[in-house]
Image: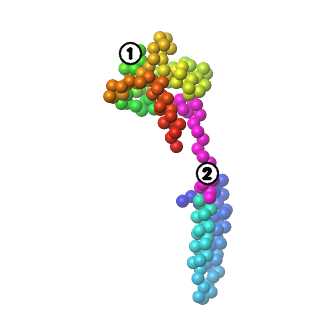
Amino acid sequence: MNFLHPSGSHLAYETILSTMFLSDRTSNIPGRRTTGGFFVALLAVLVLQTALATSAPAVAPLNDAEKIDALIRAVEARRDLQFIRLDVAHSAGEAAGLLRIKLAFAGSRVKTVDDFIDYVATASSTTGQPYFVRYPDGRQVTSAAFLREELKRIESAP
């Protein structure tokens, strides 16, 4: 359990804990119970910790450059697939390498993840022939369809 405030200050916790321990030391009166103060202070610490944990900032969504990188890494990770370019099957690593090269050549013309899919990753820039993805069962889909599905998965990931 992290007992620090997100800003790094632990003053609130120190105050609660010192109150808890001071109340135990000063209550040496015979017949008086000290466990009540201890549990109240412990409960206060737990409530404060929960409140701070729930107020933590949410993770920012990926920007377009990060989505493009995630798509290329998704292609690279799919070693079970073949990537068809100009009627030649390529490995996942080869396909990812080609996408990185084409992206570098496209430069500032690619501003969004949609630009990347539409203008870089779906067809040959010289012949216009579409790229395909072949699954182990022999089924083929266009690289655009494959990448759009991967993009949905990436965007829905926590």
Determine the residue located farthest toward the bottom in the rendered image. Answer: 30
Which residues lie in the magenta part?
51-69
Quadrant containing the N terminus is: bottom right
- 21 relative to 55, above or below: below
- Res 116 visible: yes
Amino acid at dot 2:
Ala
Tell whether label 1 touches label 2 (CB within 8 Å).
no
Please state the horizontal and vertical placement of residue 130, each as a whole percent of the image: 45, 17
> Looking at the image, which residue sits at the far left?
137
Q: Residue furthest top?
A: 127
Q: Residues within 10 Å of mark 1 (few under 14, many from 20)?
A: few
x then y, percent, for residue 4: 61, 58
Left or right: 14 as drawn, with respect to 79: right
Residue at (60, 41) in percent of width and height: 60
Q: Given this view, does label 2 or label 1 mark the residue nearer the observer?
A: 1
Percent coordinates x, y for residue 49 in the rendering: 60, 60
**From this viewpoint, is residue 82 visible?**
no
Give yes or no for residue 75 being in the magenta stretch. no
> What residue did someone put label 2 on?
56
Query: Residue 45: horizontal and vertical position, in percent?
Result: 60, 65
Q: Residue at x 60, y 85 (%)?
A: 32
Rendered image: mark on residue 87: 1
Q: Amino acid at mark 1?
A: Asp
At 61% from the left and 70% from the top, the residue drawn is: 41
Q: Left or right: where does residue 142 sit relative to residue 158? A: left
Marks 2 and 1, how far apart at CA: 50 Å
Query: Looking at the image, which is closer to me, 98 or 75?
Result: 75
Decide whether residue 67 is among the magenta residues. yes
